[in-house]
């Protein structure tokens, strides 16, 4: 009976070892397949990123070129507006000088009136500020 128990124990031991080896083989195979799948995903993502980068590069360059064009046009427009404003200011000064030379007394009266109005506004503003303090 002892011999049959020993044989049964050996058979169970062999079965357990075989099952463990099979499980280890399956786990090793699963790890390898998972690694291979992950590597394929990484390679695919890298290819897609490279493709997107190559597609995006001309778009970005086009946007930059358009931005440069817009900036140059804005600078040119600002220069033109500055030249026009300066020209209009010079014409206004010339008209004012002409008016003052043609009607000096009237010009002095207008200047005095404007000065008095500005002084009155300043005095009113100061009076309001002194009443509003907390």
Image: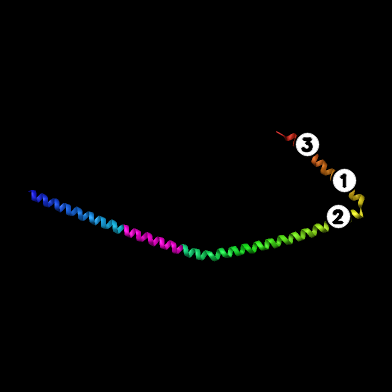
**Residue 51: image location, x then y, percent:** 47, 65
Label 1, secondary structure: give it: helix
- Which quadrant holds residue 96? bottom right
Q: Which residue is label 2 attached to?
A: 96
12 versus 74 height, above or below: above
Q: In percent of the image, x 76 and y 61: which residue is there?
A: 83
Question: Do the residues bearing badges 1 and 3 touch, measured as CB atoms within 8 Å?
Answer: no
Q: Which residue is label 3 attached to?
A: 127
- Which quadrant holds residue 36? bottom left
- Verify whether residue 47 appears in magenta: yes
Task: Give the Cα separation between the discs numbered 1 and 3.
Answer: 22 Å
Q: Which residue is label 1 attached to?
A: 112
Task: Give the Cα separation between the discs numbered 2 and 3.
Answer: 34 Å
Label 2, secondary structure: give it: helix
| Left or right position of 98 against 134 | right
Q: Mostly what secondary structure, the magenta segment?
A: helix
**Residue 111: image location, x then y, percent:** 87, 48
Highlighted magenta segment, given as a residue range: 31-48
Q: Earlier in the sequence, mark 1 or mark 3?
A: 1
Disc 2 packing (10 Å; few <14; some 14–19; many ≥20): few
Label 3, secondary structure: give it: helix
């Amino acid at each position: 009976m002892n011999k049959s128990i020993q044989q049964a124990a050996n058979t169970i031991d062999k079965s357990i070892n075989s099952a463990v080896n099979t499980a280890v083989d399956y786990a090793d195979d699963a790890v390898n397949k998972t690694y291979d799948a992950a590597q394929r995903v990484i390679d695919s993502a890298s290819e897609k990123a490279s493709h997107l980068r190559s597609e995006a590069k001309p778009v970005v360059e086009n946007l930059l070129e358009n931005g440069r064009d817009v900036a140059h046009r804005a600078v040119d427009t600002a220069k033109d507006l500055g030249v026009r404003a300066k020209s209009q200011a010079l014409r206004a000064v010339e008209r004012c000088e002409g008016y003052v030379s043609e009607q000096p007394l009237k010009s002095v009266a207008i200047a005095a009136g404007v000065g008095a109005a500005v002084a009155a506004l300043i005095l009113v503003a100061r009076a309001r500020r002194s009443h509003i303090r907390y």
